[in-house]
Image (spheres, rainbow, N blue to C red):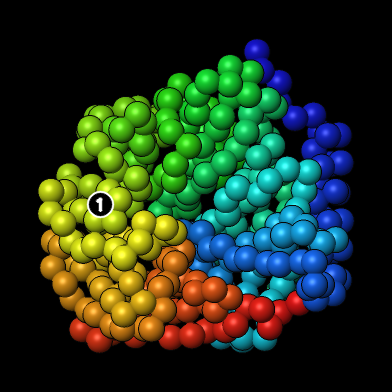
Amino acid sequence: MRKKRKPLRQLLYLATLLAVAVYASSCEKSTPNESRSYRLSRGGYSPDAGAVLLALHFHGGERAGTTVLVMYVEREQSMNVVYGPPQGKLFDFAWSPTRDTFAVTHGSGVALFRKDGPEENYQGTTVQCLIDVLYTHCAWSPSGEWLAVVCFDLEKASENRLGLYKVKDETFMITELSIDPRPLIWEDDTTLHAVKNGNILEVGMRAGNPRLIRSTPLDEGVSEFCGMFGNRPLVRKGRDVFLGDKVLIELDSGEGRRVIATKSLIFVSASATDFTVFNHHGHEVGKASPGKVVYLGSIGEDSRTVYGLAGSMLLRVHLDNTTLKVEDVSDLDGFH
């Protein structure tokens, strides 16, 4: 039987985590030997808090590692350091739909951060996880009842499996479902999609018992699974974006995350001069020429809004009727 983390180990780990967060908040700005980059997650925006979760990666220098920041969009100059680099790589982070909690997977475990009181402070706690497991991608169910996590078994070193954390019971389990180390996408509270060996897995969650409903083969050459609309997968093959068998658009490059789907819309940053939005039928409903490629990250306050990055610039993309607006929010390099 696999062992869970011991309470003492949990406390020591959390103490280290919070100490690093305090250190990160007092760091000075970049040095000549230090560079930085930024990352958004799919679940990185909280409408209630009006805030975006950002991962700030320091490359080289004394601050090498990753810090998670809460940036308040309506107050551009307000940013709160909530998590510093622990002894392991930060993999993913996502805001719960309940909006008062976000999750962080950092390789050796899962941490939950909840807002602590009226101030903009977040208290971190570790989830009771199994040892000898690497925790990578994570995704909340739409209601915030479940957190799905990709778990790599370090003992077997041969497969990733689906892990599920039930918020109400504060329990974590690793299922027998074998999946690829790719992002997980919830269709609704009872249906989760994952990828395994070129197949899309539909996992049913009725009555809290995960089970494989069906496995749908993907075409060869699919490099990214972006979502499901009915029985039609939204995927990227090289530079082409497909909805089912239909080619929606061609990207000018295959690098970076350029496609993101909300409940009803598909946002595609095809090039610096072509940002296009499609509905779930694959019909174009909005278009803009922002003058820069936008690397998409977070679904915003509604299904018509997403957030992305262009270099150090955080951008908000919003479809207002048929008018697509791509707006600068803040230059992140202005924060130190």
Residue 159: x and y, percent?
50, 24
How dense is the environment of label 1, judged by Cα within 10 Å: few (below 14), some, or many (20 and up)? many
Instruction: Give the tally of numbered discs.
Output: 1
Q: Nearer the viewer, residue 331 or 150?
A: 331
Residue 93: x and y, percent?
58, 54
Q: Quadrant of residue 246?
A: bottom left
Which amino acid is tagged 1? Leu
Residue 75: x and y, percent?
61, 86
The answer to whether any part of residue 164 appears in the image is no
Please tell me whether residue 240 is drawn above or below residue 78 in the rendered image. above
Residue 167 located left or right of residue 271? right
Residue at left offset 74%, top offset 55% = 65
Residue at left offset 80%, top offset 66% = 33
The N terminus - image quarter:
top right
Please tell me whether residue 311 is drawn above or below residue 207 in the rendered image. below
Residue at left offset 86%, top offset 71% = 26
- Name the residue beneath numbered marker 1: 234
The answer to whether any part of residue 135 appears in the image is yes
Residue 94 located left or right of residue 59? left
* Secondary structure at numbered mark 1: strand
Please tell me whether residue 176 is drawn above or below residue 253 in the rendered image. above
Residue 328 located left or right of residue 20? left
Q: Quadrant of residue 252?
A: bottom left
Residue 195: x and y, percent?
36, 36
The C terminus - image quarter:
bottom right
